[in-house]
Image (tube, grey):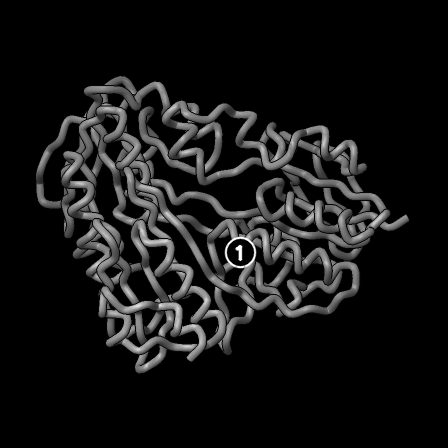
Amino acid sequence: MSHIVVIGAGQAGASLVARLRNDGFDGKITLIGAEPHPPYQRPPLSKAYLLGEMEMERLFLRPESFYAENDITLRLGQPVTGIDQKARTVTVGGEVIQYDELALTTGSEPRRLPAAIGGDLDGVHVVRDLAHIDAMEPKVKDGARALIVGGGYIGLEAAAVCAKRGVKVTLVEMADRILQRVAAPETSDYFRTLHSKYGADIREGVGLDHLTGENGRVTGAVLSDGTELPVDFVVVGVGITPSTQLAEMAGLDLDNGIKTDAHGRTSDPNIWAAGDCASFPHKGDRIRLESVPNAIDQAEIVAQNMLGAARDYVAKPWFWSDQFDVKLQIAGLNTGYDRVVTRQGEGPSVSYWYYRGDQLIAVDAMNDPRAYMVGKRLIEMGKTADPAVVADAGADLKPLLKA
């Protein structure tokens, strides 16, 4: 009986093993996770879970009983310490396990502040897993003072939750504006205004020089412009990096993550990769996507290909972010845009449409699901949208789908 081992019990790993069983694989499946919990959702961690609006069990992607009922062996709280390509074995918890096919769904890790500037002080937090949120939650209380380092989506979402719980928030972003790496100035302006409305102190073009502390605990911050701030805790939101240590130890090819072909196969024909950790071909380039939809879709394609389907993974990038009462929905990738068209929706809703030349390549929609859905379908069909129609708030967008 063949044995498929999956390392990484997150969204991608859970989706992969479920798809294997759903598509009729009747061999052995082992899903290995370093955390003690069964696979769970990460997006609600820094929002509903941190706010106390969601119990831990509701985070779980499936009841723990699902895995036993589908004859999937869960090895939790046991990080893998080695992969032997030639012998086709993995070492976990001191035990050597044989595999026929191996999938790496190891996800990503948050970037941390260097210890040299105080990153190892108590009270300095990252936002990635349950343990991180559980450690931070007692400090997120009315009247506390928080420094958020990083003005990307991770930092802004953390700032929003802190502000909702009455925390005095100061956010610093080294770049000229928040969201500079991922969004147009229009989107940056929208979220700067939103956070300022809720009392956040947004400082752009200013970085963190170092943190100060007493008895090993953070008590203050010195910014790059010399400003000194008293702080009770710090949230570091300066991006994530793909978890490639195991792949590197195994001698697999890396390229901004674990390098795979269009089927999800790595440089070893018996090892596959999916999710945040994997880079793959996309429209003549190579990309790596950090999103729940990508983790699910790519993992399911890899599961099918492990069973012989030989299907290319064709990514349809979309993302979302919840901040205060705003749901941002993003379709497409805005890399290389040279024009942004604004469409004013009903009330406070608005969307920004990115063009490269005459081609629509991405849409940012704030509380405007209709604009988002039309833009997403146009991008997936390879169609564009007349900028004049997009900019006309009274124009119906649906005919664009039939053009």
Report which quarter residue 336 is drawn in. bottom left
x and y percentages locating residue 61 in the rendered image? 59, 37
Report which quarter residue 203 is drawn in. top left
x and y percentages locating residue 380 in the rendered image? 48, 70
Horizontal side of 200 relative to 331 (left or right) equals left
Seen as rendered, the residue at the extreme left is 226
Q: Is residue 181 above or below residue 219?
A: below
Q: Residue at x 30, y 41 (%)?
A: 323
> Observer-nearest residue: 315 or 378?
378
Q: Is residue 359 above or below residue 390?
A: below
Q: Which residue is mark 1?
A: 294
Horizontal side of 137 relative to 394 (left or right) equals right
Report which quarter residue 158 is drawn in. top left
> Observer-nearest residue: 199 or 259?
199
- Position of the C terminus, as image quadrant, is bottom left
Horizontal side of 288 relative to 159 (left or right) equals right
Residue type highlighted by circle 1? Asn
Seen as rendered, the residue at the extreme right is 1
Q: Residue at x 71, y 56 (%)?
A: 303
How many marks the image carries: the answer is 1
Decide: few, some or many residues near mark 1? Use Cα within 10 Å; few <14, some 14-19, many ≥20. Answer: many
Horizontal side of 24 relative to 278 (left or right) equals right
Q: Is residue 163 above or below residue 149?
A: above
Element type at mark 1: helix
Q: Residue at x 86, y 50 (%)?
A: 2
Q: Residue at x 22, y 69 (%)?
A: 392
Q: Is residue 365 above or below residue 237?
A: below
x and y percentages locating residue 284 in the rendered image? 50, 78
